[in-house]
Amino acid sequence: MKTNYSLIALISILSITLFPLSNSFKPPDSFRGLMVEEKTRLGSTPPSCHNKCNQCHPCMAVQVPTLPSHNRVDPSSTRSKQTEDYFDSSGNRYSNYKPLGWKCRCGGHFYNP
């Protein structure tokens, strides 16, 4: 029984010595480039704001919070229906849902791209 513990200890020490933990979690260099390339493609790309800010410079693309509009589908919807859609069954607002959209900004003013 004592030899089993000694054998397990020896194997553990050899595996830690021969295969350090810091290297076991690093992907090969060929995969690192692919991972970085994949990360840069995540999310939406900013629009071109060239000539979108009425002669104001610099005109830059920025992400701004947008409010979902319920009037686009049915303009005759009532305000109580909009409020009803904004709350869930327990009465909580969807506080974690904050969609972002792109606008062009220059001098404190926002323009559509």
Image (tube, helix red, strand yellow):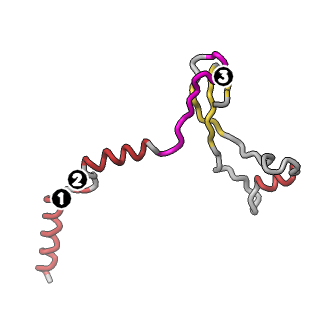
* Residue 71 in the image, given as x and y percentages of width and height: 81, 46
Say above or below: 38 vs 5: above
Q: Residues within 10 Å of mark 1 (few under 14, many from 20)?
A: few
Which one is earlier in the sequence, the residue at label 2 or at label 3?
A: 2
Residue 90 within the magenta-colored segment of the rendering: no
Q: Amino acid at mark 2?
A: Asn
Q: Residue furthest front?
A: 51
Q: Amino acid at mark 1?
A: Phe
Residue 50 within the magenta-colored segment of the rendering: yes
Q: Residue furthest bottom?
A: 1
Label 2 residue SS: helix
Query: Mark 2 or 3, which is nearer the eye?
Result: 3
- Image mark for residue 23: 2
Q: Amino acid at mark 3?
A: Gly
Which one is earlier in the sequence, the residue at label 3 or at label 1?
A: 1
The residue at 22%/53% (across/down) is: 23
Q: Is residue 8 left or right of residue 31?
A: left
Q: Residues within 10 Å of mark 2 (few under 14, many from 20)?
A: few
Q: CA distance from mark 3 to mark 1?
A: 56 Å
Q: Are marks 1 and 2 in contact (CB under 8 Å)?
A: yes
Q: Identify residue for label 1.
A: 19
Q: Residues within 10 Å of mark 3 (few under 14, many from 20)?
A: few
In the rendered image, which quarter contains the C terminus?
top right
The residue at 25%/47% (across/down) is: 29
- Looking at the magenta stretch, what is its main secondary structure? loop
- Image mark for residue 59: none
Q: Identify residue for label 3.
A: 108
Label 1 residue SS: loop
Q: Is residue 113 left or right of residue 4?
A: right
The residues colored magenta run 42-56
The residue at 61%/35% (across/down) is: 102
Residue 65, image quadrant: top right
